[in-house]
Image (cartoon, helix red, strand yellow):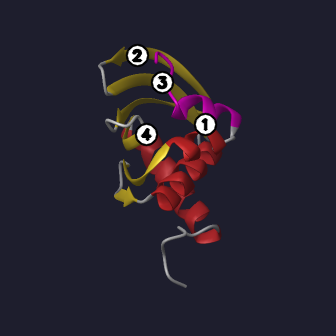
Amino acid sequence: MNESLVLPSWRSGDMKRVTSLLCTDTTFSSPVADYRGRADVAHMLGLIAAVLEGVEQTGRWGGERDRLFAFTARVDGHELQGILREEFATAGGLEHVTLLLRPYRVLRTAIAKMAQQLKVSPLPGQSA
């Protein structure tokens, strides 16, 4: 596999493929916190798709069970650079996704937009 599972979904906004490939106990490590479980991880990845604009892959590196993807995107018209690491379980499902973003000024804007998104659409795993 040479292509990211997550980046095309962020570009299109269609998270169905990624969600179907997430392991039940998958983990997402964001710049702010770690999220666990298919429902919460899929939800977070979907919200990120609504915040990031113009996602474009700029590089890739891969091993047998993990891949790194460099990308650029925009938040409120400001460019940011990111690294996305996708790690796969032996059975092939996506078991861990790690997201790194820079520069900090744009990351702060993205974090604020994500906080707004989470107020409107809380994680499925949070009790009411």
Which residue does the numbered mark 1 point to in the structure image?
Answer: 10
The amino acid at mark 1 is: Trp
Q: CA distance from mark 4 to mark 1?
A: 19 Å
- 98 to the left or right of 126: left
Q: Decide which of tag 2 and tag 4 comes sooner along the chain.
A: 2
The amino acid at mark 2 is: Arg
The crowd level at tag 4 (other Cα within 10 Å; few <14, some 14-19, many 20+) is: some
| Residue 84: image location, x then y, percent | 40, 32
Do labels 4 and 1 touch, CB within 8 Å? no
Which residue does the numbered mark 4 point to in the structure image?
Answer: 93
Q: Quadrant of residue 83?
A: top left
| Residue 118: image location, x then y, percent | 56, 65
Of all residues shown, which one is farthest toward the front? 91
Do labels 1 and 2 touch, CB within 8 Å? no
The amino acid at mark 3 is: Phe
Q: Residue at x 62, y 35 (%)?
A: 9
Q: Residue at x 53, y 67 (%)?
A: 123
Q: Is residue 111 placed above or below 106 in the rendered structure? A: below
The amino acid at mark 4 is: Gly
Which stretch did the figure color magenta? Answer: 1-12
Q: Decide which of tag 1 and tag 2 comes sooner along the chain.
A: 1
Q: CA distance from mark 1 to mark 3?
A: 11 Å
Can residue 91 be found in the magenta stretch?
A: no
Say whether residue 42 is visible: yes
Of all residues shown, which one is farthest toward the bottom? 128
Q: Residue at x 65, y 44 (%)?
A: 16
Q: Decide which of tag 3 and tag 2 comes sooner along the chain.
A: 2
Which residue does the numbered mark 3 point to in the structure image?
Answer: 71
Which residue does the numbered mark 2 point to in the structure image?
Answer: 60
